[in-house]
Amino acid sequence: MTDLVQKLYREQTLSKQELIELINCDDSAAERLRSLAEKVRIENYGHDIYVRGLIEFSNYCKQDCRYCGIRKSNLNCERYRLSFDEIMECCGEGYALGFRTFVLQSGEDAYFNDDRICEIITAIKKKYPDCALTLSIGEKSYESYKRYYDCGADRYLLRHETADKAHYEKLHPKAQSFENRRRCLNDLKEIGYQTGCGFMVGSPYQTDECIAEDLLFIKEFNPHMVGIGPFISHRDTEYRDFPSGTLEMTLRLLSIIRLMLPKVLLPATTALATIDPRGREKGILAGANVVMPNLSPVSVRKKYQIYDNKICTGDESAQCRRCLEERVHSVGCRIVTDRGDSKNI
Ligand code: SAH
């Protein structure tokens, strides 16, 4: 039998069947996979870990993704919006703590129309010209994406969620189409954003075939960033009784993605840290090179509950920053004060 770990390292891709075999490999192959992914991370990014300050500025959402706690039809979700001034304050606090990338994330909130989003982008880029600005605000038209980009937005995160159309249609209502999600990703890349796609590990009805398709899609799309984290159920959704994605599978997939796209920006996500107390550290050891702590005001953090038991909802940003510093050190790395642009160009 060919050694799939070595083959992936050499060729940076595998066939669908081989990927299915690799994600089910035994523990010793999984450890070789991890160790090669760590090596490749170090070759490309050294021991530097990039931080992104996440500002969750609204949890209003017109979409109805079945897995998500802030979906429109969750009437138990207490909705909030940050004001322009509150968003700017988050940036100020983040800048002082050494963040040089801000990520503005929200549900799809009609209140924040293009004029308002552009006003925020323009103000942040004017006040912090040395910082990168990432948007993660969902599906928009080409024209809207272009306007944000022309105002100075640098990056956009939009997970593809699943590369299998039938699976996509199970996870979302009819009004949300697989094709539109793909159209958005293509538009973002064409406009010139550093673009991020990604998916949940262990989402309801996900099969090994789905995961292999996700990996092949990521390879082909060749994004600058890939966000993956375990699915975690939310009590107010129809998936409340589905099990969470596992630590082991998430780590394997992080390593596979690092070997497929050696220069990609790969976060160890909050969801990963939610299912395991050392999730972020283990993510870094598996090839991740980015962490995205929360900069939102503590007063709203509990309300941006896309899944149950999300961590760090009670901590001040400065506490989170210190805690992360220690965690990153414990695995031989350091947090750097840098925009942390993608080398995958
Ligand atoms: N509205 C934005 C931001 C969505 S929240 C957008 O559409 O891009 C960011 C990501 O959280 C989603 O893309 C999804 O992959 C993830 N997510 C949502 N619900 C989740 C859950 N229950 N468990 C784990 N991740 C979840």
Image (cartoon, grey):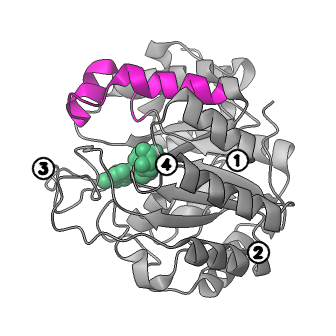
Task: Provide the secondary structure element on which disc 1 rests.
Answer: loop
Q: Residue beneath label 4, please?
A: 137
Residue type at mark 4? Ile
Specify the segment rendered in magenta: 161-189
Q: Position of residue 55 (x, y in %)?
A: 56, 66
Q: For the residue carrying disc 2, how many other residues have a C-alpha within 10 Å: few (<14), some (14-19), or many (20+)?
A: some
Among numbered discs 2 and 1, the one appearing first in the sequence: 2
Lateral position of residue 263 relative to residue 162, left or right? right
Q: Residue at x 82, y 59 (%)?
A: 48
Q: Are marks 2 and 1 in contact (CB under 8 Å)?
A: no
Task: Provide the secondary structure element on which disc 3 rests.
Answer: loop
Among numbered discs 3 and 1, the one appearing first in the sequence: 1
- Measured in 3D between alpha carbons, the distance from the residue under mark 4 to the one under mark 3, in whole angstroms, is 24 Å
When the figure is inspected, residue 229 is found, relative to residue 173, above or below; the finding is below
Quarter-of-image position of residue 212: top left
Instruction: Residue 95: give its label.
Output: 2
Among numbered discs 4 and 3, the one appearing first in the sequence: 4
Q: Residue beneath label 3, please?
A: 238
Q: For the residue carrying disc 1, how many other residues have a C-alpha within 10 Å: few (<14), some (14-19), or many (20+)?
A: many
- Measured in 3D between alpha carbons, the distance from the residue under mark 3 to the one under mark 2, in whole angstroms, is 39 Å
